[in-house]
């Protein structure tokens, strides 16, 4: 009787449901149990067949983290942080374009965190906004990327999260670099480097952003090289970050016409990316082609271009699409090299419509 009253249903309904006579549906059960402080968790049972288990995990991966029923999912800091991590994995796997709408939807849901007092939620929302900025950056939606990055910085400052501020400033510097706004990239990177008690990975990324931004400013090449020399082997980097950092160093060197060193660094990024991220693999394979073309090495460019044509369809990234268009423009004047002509045909065949 008490349970029926608390749930707002009849005693007959409780009796029939508990005996298995009545099937109320999972959605209705979740809603009713939430009223009395219970929640439904979906977990796979132990199976002898690992393939079936993997298929189940893949099917319900999006609900692997169950928020507390006492607050909405977007008011739960751990849930929001898990969403940010999921977005990052999807971006590394697929590219930014397929993930952009989902990221924007999540970002709108956490918008009210800015006016709240929950510092953990603000910090988690900053992570989500920062990842959304990276996704928009990869989609070449720069204005939206800039707004998301600025929002991430606001949230991190309100929460007092120093490393969140560093990540947001690094993302904003990265966006400025891709837009070739060297001065703004320098400003964001230097702001980040003044933050106290930075973790080694954040400090390394900000130094790298500073180096790449300096390389865009006439007369600052020496300063850019000095910043690159300070990087060394940063500790605490994930597999994704190691690949991305090696590639960024190579791109900076190529921009300063230090092509032999650039080839080595970008090749390392390609090797590392094969183990962790289709997006990074395609992006740095494209940079390999661009560096070879800029160095007037058409045979090397042809080899890399053929490899790029095979892997480019693996991701959906406006940034990669832009690289491919640039490669076709750069290589157009070298069609007298037969190998390069054939490689161009392969690349044209996979170019997005």
Image (tube, helix red, strand yellow):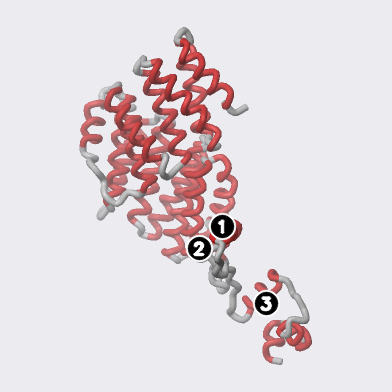
Give how far apart the Cα atoms at labels 1 and 3 are: 34 Å
Q: Which residue lies at the image location 32% right of the left edge and 30% below the top edge? A: 252
Of all residues, the one furthest to the bottom in this rendering is: 1
Residue 27: x, y in percent? Answer: 69, 69
Give how far apart the Cα atoms at labels 3 and 2 are: 22 Å
Q: Earlier in the sequence, mark 2 or mark 1?
A: 1
- Specify whether 88 is left or right of 109: left
Q: Is residue 236 above or below residue 304?
A: below
Q: Residues within 10 Å of mark 3 (few under 14, many from 20)?
A: some
Which label sits in the foreground, 2 or 1? 1
Q: Is residue 25 above or below residue 279?
A: below
Q: Earlier in the sequence, mark 3 or mark 2?
A: 3
Q: Is residue 119 above or below residue 329?
A: below
Q: Is residue 213 visible?
A: no
Mark 2 = which residue?
A: 79
Residue 332: x, y in percent? Answer: 49, 13
Q: Residues within 10 Å of mark 2 (few under 14, many from 20)?
A: many
Quarter-of-image position of residue 197:
bottom left
Mark 3 = which residue?
A: 32
Q: Dot 1 lies on which element?
A: helix
Q: Which residue lies at the image location 36% right of the left edge and 14% below the top edge? A: 296
Mark 1 = which residue?
A: 51
Along the viewing direction, whichever of 205 and 62 lies nearer the viewer? 62
Quarter-of-image position of residue 59:
bottom right
């Amino acid at each position: 009787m008490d349970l029926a009253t608390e749930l707002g249903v009849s005693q007959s309904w409780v009796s029939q449901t508990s005996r298995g006579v009545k099937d109320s549906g999972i959605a209705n059960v979740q809603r009713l149990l939430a009223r009395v402080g219970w929640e439904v968790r979906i977990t796979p049972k132990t199976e002898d067949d690992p393939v079936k288990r993997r298929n189940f995990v893949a099917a319900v991966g999006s609900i692997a983290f169950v928020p507390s029923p006492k607050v909405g999912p977007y008011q739960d800091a751990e849930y929001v942080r898990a969403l940010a991590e999921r977005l990052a994995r999807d971006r590394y796997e697929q590219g930014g374009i397929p993930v952009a709408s989902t990221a924007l939807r999540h970002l709108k849901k956490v918008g009210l965190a800015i006016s709240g007092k929950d510092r953990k939620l603000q910090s988690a929302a900053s992570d989500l906004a920062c990842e959304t900025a990276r996704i928009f950056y990869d989609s070449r939606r720069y204005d939206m990327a800039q707004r998301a990055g600025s929002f991430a910085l606001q949230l991190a400052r309100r929460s007092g999260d120093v490393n969140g501020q560093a990540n947001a400033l690094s993302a904003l510097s990265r966006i400025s670099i891709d837009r070739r706004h060297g001065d703004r990239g320098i400003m964001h990177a230097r702001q980040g480097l003044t933050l106290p008690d930075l973790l080694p990975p954040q400090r390394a990324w900000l130094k790298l952003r500073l180096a790449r931004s300096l390389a865009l400013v006439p007369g600052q090449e020496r300063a850019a090289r000095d910043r690159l020399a300070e990087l060394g082997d940063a500790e605490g980097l994930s597999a994704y970050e190691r690949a991305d950092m090696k590639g960024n160093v190579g791109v900076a060197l190529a921009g300063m016409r230090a092509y032999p060193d650039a080839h080595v660094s970008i090749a390392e990024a390609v090797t590392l990316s094969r183990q962790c991220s289709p997006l990074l693999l395609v992006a740095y394979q494209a940079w390999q082609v661009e560096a070879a073309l800029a160095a007037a090495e058409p045979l090397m460019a042809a080899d890399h271009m053929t490899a790029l044509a095979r892997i480019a369809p693996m991701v959906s990234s406006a940034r990669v699409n832009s690289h491919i268009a640039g490669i076709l423009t750069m290589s157009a004047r070298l069609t007298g090299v037969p190998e390069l002509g054939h490689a161009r045909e392969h690349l044209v065949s996979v170019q997005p419509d």
